[in-house]
Image (cartoon, grey):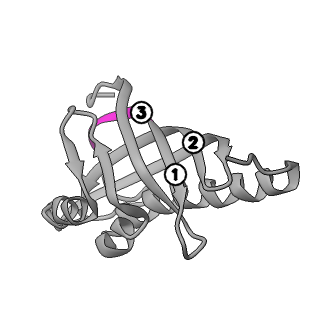
Amino acid sequence: MTIPNEAERWLVAAACCDTVARTARLTDLHEHEAFAALFTDDAELQRPDGSVLRGRAAILSAYRARPADRLTRHLVAGTVVDVVANDEACAASGVLLWRGHQDDPPGPFGRLAHGPAVVGEFDDRLRRGPDGRWRIARRLARFVLHAPAHL
């Protein structure tokens, strides 16, 4: 197990941050196949409610089952990447999640947000595949704080 030099470490960190950011963007765009493709075939995704999705196919199936009118925006920030080895890294990210409905009419400030605004975290373990791409092998998603819906 070789740990990359400093320049390689920066490249790995940038690639891992890109993978994490893309998961949020693709989820918000309802691009479920592209979202699931950012996970390894044997990935585990633990949701904030504690349920675990095992395998890329299960992740894809669960996200396809989401309501089509569900509108989300995941704002991912502060991602810190620790390179464990040439082909393995860990990333910790803060997440702000807002939810709404596509069917609500947009106003001058966009659509009305529903439910509480939620602050959460992603703890990801990423692996570099044979194709050189970094994918999430394990994600632990959890909520940490929320603002009441009536604010």
CA distance separating discs 2 and 3: 14 Å
Q: Position of residue 6 (x, y in %)?
A: 86, 48
Asked whether 117 falls inside the magenta stretch, the response is yes
How crowded pointer 1 is (Cα within 10 Å; few <14, some 14-19, many 20+) is rated as many
Check disc 1 and give the amino acid type.
Leu
Asked whether 113 falls inside the magenta stretch, the response is no
**Relative to residue 141, is residue 87 drawn left or right?**
right
Residue farthest along the front direction in this orientation: 1
What's the residue at 87%, 55% (across, down)? Answer: 7
Residue 147 makes an appearance in the image: yes
Q: Are marks 1 and 2 in contact (CB under 8 Å)?
A: yes
Secondary structure mainly formed by the magenta segment: strand
For marks 2 and 3, the one nearer the N-term is 2
Is the residue 58 above or below the residue 93 in the image? below
Viewer-side label of 3, 1: 1
Residue receiving disc 1 = 126
Residue receiving disc 3 = 120
**Residue closer to the observer: 116 or 75:** 75
Residue receiving disc 2 = 91
Magenta stretch: give its range.
Answer: 114-121
Q: Which mark is residue 30?
A: none
